[in-house]
Amino acid sequence: MPNCTAETMSFGRLGRCQIEANFEGGALSSDGGLMLLRQADRRIGLSKAVAAALHDPRKQDMIAHEMRDLVAQRLYGLCCGYEDLNDHSALRHDPLMQTAVGKRDELGSSPTLCRLEKRATRSDVVALNGVLVEQFIASQTSPPAELVLDIDASDIPLHGDQELKEFHAYYDSHCYLPLYVFCGKAMLACVLRRSRIEGARHSAALIKLLVTRLRQTWPDVRIIVRGDSGFCRQRLIRWCERRGVGYVIGLARNARLQRQVAGWERLMEHHHAASGVKQRLIREFTYAAQTWDRPRRVITRLEFGSQGNNPRFIVTNLEGCPTELYDGLYCQRGEAENRIKEAQLDLFGTRASCQRFLSNWLRIMFSALAYTLMCRLRELALANTELAKATTTTIRVKLLKIGAAVVRNTRRIQILLASHHPLRDVYFVVANNLASP
């Protein structure tokens, strides 16, 4: 690759003027929104909490970069779109990144950050999951009356020789199978797993840990667990029933369930033939699979149209109108899938190219923590703005990627943002919101 940093590039002419460019602008940055991330991080104490959770075997009197600085550098880089550790070879010299992290000299190098990943232990990643929960608890200004926990799994494709790499037939690739838990838009847990396992494995234990911690803080909170049919397992359902936890979980179609709704489907087929209009019906009945210890309430959503029957089933221990439980509660489960996509695609939560399994888990946790930082930025500062419901990518493009010049002397650090940035008014609002206590 040619060395273009000291060369002039020509872009033709504009009238009588020759258009030229080079990379000799000096103390400029393309990430003017870094200071917003710094302020949000200071408000919620995320990088400090992460640094405290990670073990640090280095000799403290010989280190050049504090753990908190390395964590902040990595999280801010992910939020700004830099997924590779190699990017930090240049970013460590970025004056605005240095200022955001809290230093005036060079930040950690790519090898330094790589060593941080390679020394990951299981205790580290478990502790970081605890940071996610504590961040969620701290974000609540008052005790919530109800919490809905969405549990779901996804895949992380693998293309190298990673530890515990296995082939998964459903995804038709070698992959890991991470398990996520969300409450609204907040991520409460991210557990990286090998792929050749039962999809619901560890779900009951994970929900138990989360419910126990949440009830320590809010003893009277009502908790509901929501998931697709992959999590309809007796261990999880029975634990929820014993501990007074509500659940609404998908139930896979089978011959017995099909016979149970056959009469309703024939009636819908008759109405469809007479009217030509797609038919929809929600009903409930009591059902017990052979492995169940007792019958449970099952709600079914039936549809009949030009393509025939399309039944869906859920099992629940909640009371209330079947339509409200299905349409108003269960169908909202799909929002968790959008949040997984945001964490994996926008914040590089599929970047599992380390050889060690635990190093990859730590990488995924950093993406989860960067997702948390972006969510808290949105909650704390973007309410009542045009970015109040924006995704991470939109916030990055419109608010973080701003050209800025940095002027530093012994008494002041001055950041000169692009004069014609379209969302300069929003930037002012966000900065003021984050400055308030």
Image: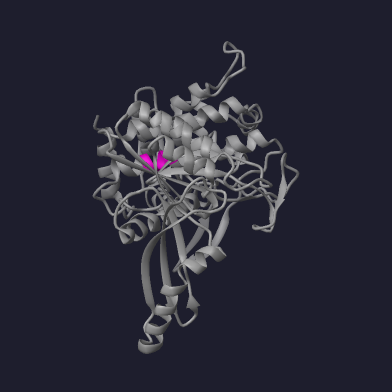
- The residue positioned farthest toward the bottom in the image shown: 274
Question: Would you identify the image quadrant in which residue 305 lies?
Answer: bottom left
Residue 375 among magenta residues = yes
Res. 72 visible in picture? no
Question: Residue placed at 39% from the left, 37% from the top?
Answer: 37
Q: Main secondary structure of the magenta part?
A: helix
Res. 275 visible in picture? yes
Relative to 123, does residue 323 appear above or below in the rendering?
A: below
The residue nearer to you, when weighing 269 against 409, is 269
Relative to 258, does residue 171 appear above or below in the rendering?
A: above
Question: Would you identify the image quadrant in which residue 353 lies?
Answer: top right
Relative to 106, does residue 433 appear above or below in the rendering?
A: below
Residue 11 image offset from top left, x and y in percent: 53, 62
Give the left or right position of residue 107, taking residue 218 as reference.
Answer: right
- Numbered range of the magenta stretch: 372-376
Question: Residue placed at 32% from the left, 50% from the top?
Answer: 319
Give the left or right position of residue 70, taking residue 96 as reference.
Answer: right
Q: How is the image coloured?
A: one colour
Image quarter hosting the C terminus: top left
Residue 342 among magenta residues = no
Residue 238 image offset from top left, x and y in percent: 48, 40
Question: Would you identify the image quadrant in which residue 356 lies?
Answer: top right
The residue nearer to you, when weighing 334 against 415, is 334
